[in-house]
Structure formats: C-alpha cells, structure tokens
Amino acid sequence: MRLALLTPAMGSRNVGDALIEEAVCRLVPAQSLQRLTLRRPLTPEEMRQLNDCDAAILCGSNLYQEHWGCGFLTPEFLHELKIPLIPLGIGCSAAAGESPRVAADKLPLLREMHRRSRIGSVRDAATQRWLQGIGIDNVRLTGCPVLFHALRRPEFHRINPEAPVALSLRRDFLHGAECLERLQWPILDPLCRQLQPTLVSQGPADDAQALALARRHDLQVFNHWQDGATESYEWLARHQSWSLNLRLHFGMLSLSHGKPSWWIGQDSRVEGFCQLMGLPWRHIRDWQTGMLKEMGPGHEAQFADVPQRWDQLAATMREVLAANGLPCALDLPAPKPKPRVLFLVPRRQWAYDFSAQSLASRLSPEFDIRIRYSTDRPALRPEAYDLAQVFYWGEDAHLGRGFDPAKVLMGCSSHRWQHPGKHGPLSSLDFAQRHLQGAATVLTTSLRLQRLIRPAHPSVQHAPNGYEPSLFFSKSARRGPLRIGAAGFRKDPVKGYDDILIPAAKGMDMELAEGSMSHGQMNDFYNRFDVIAITSQHEGEPLTLMEAMAAGCFPVCSDVGIVPELVRHLDNGYIVPHWSVEAFRAAFQWCAEHLDRVREAGQRNAAMMPGLRSWDLLCDLHRNHLRQALSESTGARIALCSRLEPSHPQRQRLARLLGRLGLSWSPATARDAEAPDLSDEWRRCSIMGLPWRPALRLRYRLGLNHNGPHGLEWEELEQLLRQGLLPRPPSPQNPLARLQRRIQRQWQNLFD
C-alpha cells in the first residue's frame, strides 16, 4: 500500500511533531510513504504525488485550536483531493477546563475533511465531544499515536533507582497562560537540585531554559529538535527510571515504553490525556515542593490501570485502521530489535548522500539506519546508536560528542590529505593520527587508498561505492563525430579542467557539466558523449567514472582512484600515462581515429557495469563490514574491581553514575590484570593537559572501596567520564550568533 502522510513535522521546530510522525509510521506500516507538509497549501506537483497514493493520513497534532495551524486545508485542496483522508489521533488545544475555539469559517472545512474518511480518530475525550458538538460523529477515541510507539502493551515494574530521571521542559505556555511562565523557575530549580535529572528540550523555545539549568546544576541536555531526530529521545525513554514532564509527548513516549511518568501542566492537552489514562497530574499553579514525594520509586501502583486502558485504546485503533483499509502493526509479531546505525553525511544531495541513501535502503531489513547531515548541525549523542559510520574523513560534527571509537567506522574516499591545500600534505601516518584515531575501522573506496593507509591503522577495509543501474544506463547507440564530456566543479584545481582538459580538447566537440543536475539529467548528459574525460590529479573514485561507463561512455582518464580497478588500457578505456595537455590531446586523437572501437567498448562498459559495481552487488560487502564492527564493539568498557556487595551504597552510586553516562561495565576477570587503570589514565592526561578519551578496543580497570574509586575522588571520576563520554558543555551564544541563527531559521521556514 502506498500512503501519503500529511505531517506537521516538516518545517517544525518542535520534536514532538516528529515523535507523532514516527509513531504513525510504526503503527501503520506501508510499502511506500510520501511525506507532505500540512503547514501550507500544496503545490500542483505535490497534489499529483498525493493523489497517486492509495490514502492519506492526517498526522495527529494540536490542529483544532484558536491559532489555526492547517495552512494546507483550503476548499481548493479538498476539491482536488481524490483519495481518502484519514485523521489519526487529532487533538484540540485550549486552556485547562475550557473548550477549543476555532474560527467559524473553518468549521465547514473540518466537516468536509472528516467526511473523506470512514472513521477518524482523536486523542482525548474533550476533542471528541467538541467535534460531535459541531456535527462530526465519525470519530473514535484512540489516544495519541505516540502512546503506541513501542507497538506493545506497556508493563510497569519496580522503578530502577540506578537509571537517570528525565525532566521535559516547556518554556512557553499558550491560551492566555503566559502569566504562569514565571512560576517555572521556582519549581524547576529545586527539582534539578534534588533529582539531578536529564533535561529534555523539544524545541528552540525550551533551549534557553534547559541550558541555563544545565549550567547551574551541571546536567545533561537532550535537545535534538534541530534535525527532528527522535532516536535519542527514544533511547532516553527506554533507559530512564521515570520522568517528570511539562511536555506531553516525551512523557507519553515514556509511558509507551513502560516507564512511569508524571505531569505538571496548564492546558487541556495534559488534562485530557491524564484523564484518559487515569493518571494524576498537577496544575502548575498548585505545585508545591512536597508533591515530589508522591512520585518516583514506591509509587508504581499509580500506573496499575494504564495497561488495561491501553488495551482498550489499542482495540479501538485497530477498528479505525481496519475500517479505513489500513494495515496495523499492533497485530503483527513484535519486531526483532535491529542494531541502530548512524550515517553521518556532510550535506544533502551530494555524492556521499546518494551513497548513504542507496546503502540505507538495502541494509534496512537488518539495520535501523538514521542519516544525519553535518550542515544541519545535528545535536548528536552516542547513546542512541550501536554504530556510527562517518562518510567523510574530514568530518568533525561527531567529535567531542562522546562517541566510543570502538563503535565508529570512518570513510576515506579522497587523497586530498596527500596534496597541498586545506588538509595536506600529510604522510599516511600523520593522516591516520590526525583524522582516523577516533575510528576503530577505516573504509576505503579504492584499493589504492587501502594500500596507502593500511600500514598506519589497525583495521582498513575495502568498501567500494556503487551506482544505481536504474538511473544510469545506455539509452541508444552514439552517432556522428566524436563527442567528449566531463562533469565537475571547474574551479577545483584538482580536477584539471582549466589546466588540462580545455586546452587538450581545443577544436573538438567537448562539454563540461557544472552545477546541480538530477540523476535523469546526468544520465541524459552522459548519453550524449562517446568519451568521458577524467583529468584529475588525484581522486578517490570518481563516481562520474562509474556512472558514465554505465551509460555507455569510453573513459579517457588519469591513473587515479579506482581507474585501474575498472579500466583496461586500450580495451575498455584509455589510461593517460602523464598528467599533461599533450598526453590527453594524444588520447583524444586516438579516440577520434578509432571511433568505432571506442563506441563498441562503450557498449561493453554499459553491459559490464551492473555485474561489477551495482549497489545490489556491493551491499553484502558493506553489510559484512557493519556486522564485523558490531561484533568487535560489543563488551563492557569498564572492568570493576570491588569486594563490595551489589547492595552497598557506594556500589549503587557507581552504577547510577555509569548508567547516567551510558557506560557499560562488568566485574573484572583475570585477563583484565593488564588492562590500563582508569585512575592512572586520569593522572597521565592531567600531566599532559589533555582530556581523557577512551582508546580503541581498550577495557579499563576501575577499583572501588568504601570511600570511593581507588586513586580518585567521586568528583574527579565524574569529571573524567563526562569529559570523555558526553558532548561538550553548552556555551552561551553572543548576540550576533543568535541573530544569525534567527535569520537562518526564518529563511528555512520561508522555503519550507
């Protein structure tokens, strides 16, 4: 089934919208999913894509309120819509105890929207009553989709006191309750002092509050709203002990994964949800410090009715989906957890991105792959991933974020570190020490790079890039005189276009493609030429070589990158012996004199490439690299040496500290006698003036006595681990930086 998802998460600055969208995608599995924004009217092309689907799901959010957020919903939209539209988990929003207010001219649109589905669903009873009051009866009460994020009945067991406590923040209030915002600091400051919680920020409005509390109390902050990433929030929801929430959706996510959650609220959303689930909540006006005693360990009985209420809502959700002909993952066997892999890519729509997308689509049955882009400045955290593959060796977005080198794979697909410029020249040893020390495995796209780096790093694997045969192929036989093509950035001196290509091809039919082109346009471009020219001084591959050969071109190229792996001189290509105008001029003249031979070889290239470099062929090799890295990265990094009983307060204190930092540990064995001692490492780093970082594949000994870690005070141990395992502490931005980010957000929202 092909589904369209009308989602508020596109262009959102609140990760709560992303949590709802991900929950819907997990709840309603589809063969393909088309994401479209509901924050503005759709373009004609977007409407065409929407109507090509079997049905559209209107993703649950606070759509019914005085501040109308449905820019997509117009009479023109409903007139052009040809497929069913299913509202799923929609909610109203108003002050606590009040009904929502919506402009009268929007009510006919709401009625028509709900008429497009057999049955819609709402998240709370207040929304259902309000819709029925305006004549919309085909809605059922299902709860918010986030409540079904885990796809299983939540079970609440004894709270683990060693796990961290989470506190989700909400700086800005709505519906005339702004006057209550000043009550927050007297509440949050003592809570942070007593609980030492992990702070959860769902959007930019929460960040200032979160960072101020983090600096004051030395706390961790989860603030991943920048790129809409949800995996870190899910990790925290699954590994926390309990949560206290001013935000609705993180607490709901916690409940979904069987973690007790309490709320301090001020609007109908929190009130309606807690009434639905039979949970206590406190209005912010009524909060008193002593109320904290009613939460946390010992109060699990307050959630005894939640599983039964979840069952009732799940049954209704199944009925709603079935009535609309949609699949439901609640009826499927519980999926086996997949290893979570981060693909860190420099930017969208670049070669690295295309490779990452192709790999992710093929490896998704075995791995849960999340692609993040460094140009988005993602707030990366290591806890949510089992492995991280960094596609560009010059990347720094993950540095200082606490990624364990044993769980990092680093891609190397260029030789720029060998040559003068921004990154070089460096020897192989200097390159490995400067750029590859933070990765247990290096993946090279060429055998040439593998041979260069292997003496300087313990694990260097060959991981060639591929191409998509459905995108690059020969369309027809070439005719007419010799035509030469090239593709790349002309101002890049490494490519040799001004120095070599243009002078060498003078008087011949030559064309250079610059700028961005779609894959279809690039394939058309390649199919216009007999010869693809690669005049680079050094290359890791290049991708244009593979794509052009797949499109039926005859390569004339320098001896760089993967050229010896694909090209046989004077058989299916021409390897130019010298990087000079004269040598390339002679190669082009040879092609003109042997044009029939060149074209026949080009067609052989097109037939050869799918069996040599297609992604379907190469994905098994990449899958094996991830499996091997995953196998080698498992195991505790701390070997604990202690005679204290597990119930001893100091032993529990250490377990809480390690759990809060996401660090695994196990009792020391005889083979750990030679492992480096953590206190010795701390002294060595202190003498050198360097922060401690966990080394590749090393396990560290840590002794524990009645007073604290051997050789360390508790404060020293926590500082050491925080420096090595957590992101850098937040620093206040100057006014100019804040203004710059505000302008960038406005431009992004404009284009979204």
Image (spheres, grey):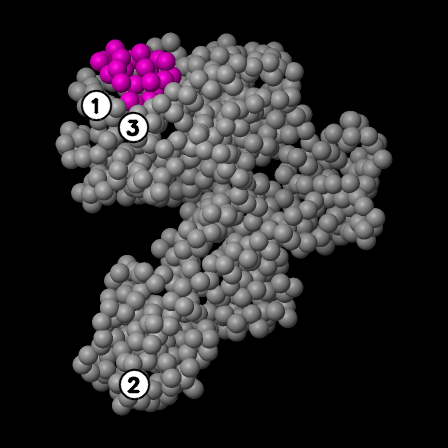
Q: Is residue 13 visible?
A: no
Q: Earlier in the sequence, mark 3 or mark 2?
A: 3
- Magenta residues (range): 119-141
Question: Which residue does the image show at 50% across and 48% down from the upper left?
Answer: 366
Q: Is residue 672 visible?
A: yes
Gap in angstroms between the C-alphas marked 3 and 2: 60 Å
SS for tag 1? helix
- Find out whether the residues at labels 1 and 2 contact each other: C-beta distance under 8 Å: no
Question: Which of the numbered marks, if any, corresponds to residue 115?
Answer: 1
Quarter of the rendering occupied by the N terminus: top left
Check disc 1: other Cα within 10 Å, few if <14, some if 14-19, many if 20+.
Answer: some
SS for tag 3? loop
Check disc 3: other Cα within 10 Å, few if <14, some if 14-19, many if 20+.
Answer: some
Estimate the x, y position of residue 517 in percent, counting from the top left. Answer: 28, 61
Instruction: Name the residue type under label 1.
Output: Arg
Can you say whether 132 is above or below 637 in the image? Answer: above
| Residue bearing the label numbered 2 | 597
Question: Which of the numbered marks, if any, corresponds to residue 540?
Answer: none
Question: Which residue does the image show at 47% across and 30% down from the upper left?
Answer: 151
Q: Is 140 colored magenta in this rendering?
A: yes
Instruction: Name the residue type under label 3.
Output: Asn
Which dot, 3 or 2, sits closer to the camera? 3
Q: Earlier in the sequence, mark 1 or mark 2?
A: 1
- Number of numbered labels in the structure image: 3
Gap in angstroms between the C-alphas marked 1 and 3: 12 Å
